[in-house]
Amino acid sequence: MTAPRPAGPRPGSPRIEPVDLSEADGELAEILSGALTHDGRPLNIFGVLGRHPKLLKRFNLMGGFILNKGLLPAREREIVILRVGWNAQAQYEFGQHTVIGKDVGLTDEEISALTRDGGNWSDDDAALIALADDLHADDCVSDSTWAALSTRWSDEELIELLIVAGFYRLVSGFLNSAGVQLDGGVPGFPE
């Protein structure tokens, strides 16, 4: 069985064009100089967010913390992000984090399984998937999911799990609504 997909279509082209990087100067040029790149260019998400440099700067602080300084193991963090991206049908998010997920140890089979219900997950991994699904369905983690998560994660880590899921839900909605296009060579959803 496949996790439910939303009914609405996603834009097939950008609704907001990325900034022309040759025109970036001052604060925007400084921010983009530290952004993740693909073929020497900042990723499309940063080009679109570059239309609002002050927000991009703060977005990068939160995203950078989650990806580089958080308490959660990278593999488990990516399970949550990928499931959030799937639930939101955010192809850009799912594609970028497919690359990151593979880098931190997720297999192609595990990434593909995140697009379906069930699967051969450990109890700990299944609880992470349930967290993403509960928040997608009701904006609240159920008592049973919370109990399962609490057997492994500290209060500090539980807070971070909620913030990771919420942040990437926000990112997924932004990517979908702005029509941010995949960067070259980045996969979309698995077949």
Image (cartoon, grey):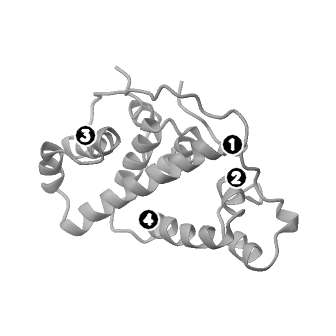
Measuring 39% from the left and 31% from the top, which residue is drawn there? 113
SS type, badge 1? loop
Judged from the image, the secondary structure of the residue bearing numbered disc 3 is helix
Q: Position of residue 179 (x, y in %)?
A: 66, 42
In the image, which is nearer the foreground, mark 4 or mark 1? Answer: 1
Depth order, front residue of 143/106: 143
Label 3 vs 4, first from the N-terminus: 4
- Crowding near the residue tagged with mark 2, few <14, some 14–19, many ≥20 C-alpha atoms within 10 Å: many
> Label 4 sits on what residue type?
Ile
User: Mark 2: which amino acid?
Assistant: Asn
The kind of residue on which mark 3 rests is Ala
Residue at 46% x, 39% y: name it: 88
Disc 1 versus disc 3: nearer the observer:
1
Separation of marks 2 and 3 at Cα, in angstroms: 32 Å
Callout 4 touching callout 1 (CB < 8 Å): no
Which structural element holds mark 4?
helix
Q: Mark 4 points at which residue?
A: 66
Residue 41 sits above or below residue 147 on the image: below
Up-down relation of residue 182 to residue 24 (above or below): above
User: Horizontally, is 118 left or right of 36 in the view?
Assistant: left
Q: How far apart are marks 2 and 1 (CA)?
A: 7 Å
Q: Which label's residue is closer to the chain start, 1 or 3? A: 3
Q: Is residue 77 left or right of residue 8?
A: left
Q: Name the residue under label 3.
A: 126
CA distance separating discs 1 and 3: 30 Å
Q: In this view, does 103 lie to the left or right of 182?
A: left
Distance CA(mark 2)–CA(mark 4):
19 Å
Which class describes the residues within 10 Å of circle 1: few (<14), some (14-19), or many (20+)?
Answer: many
Tag 1 residue: 181
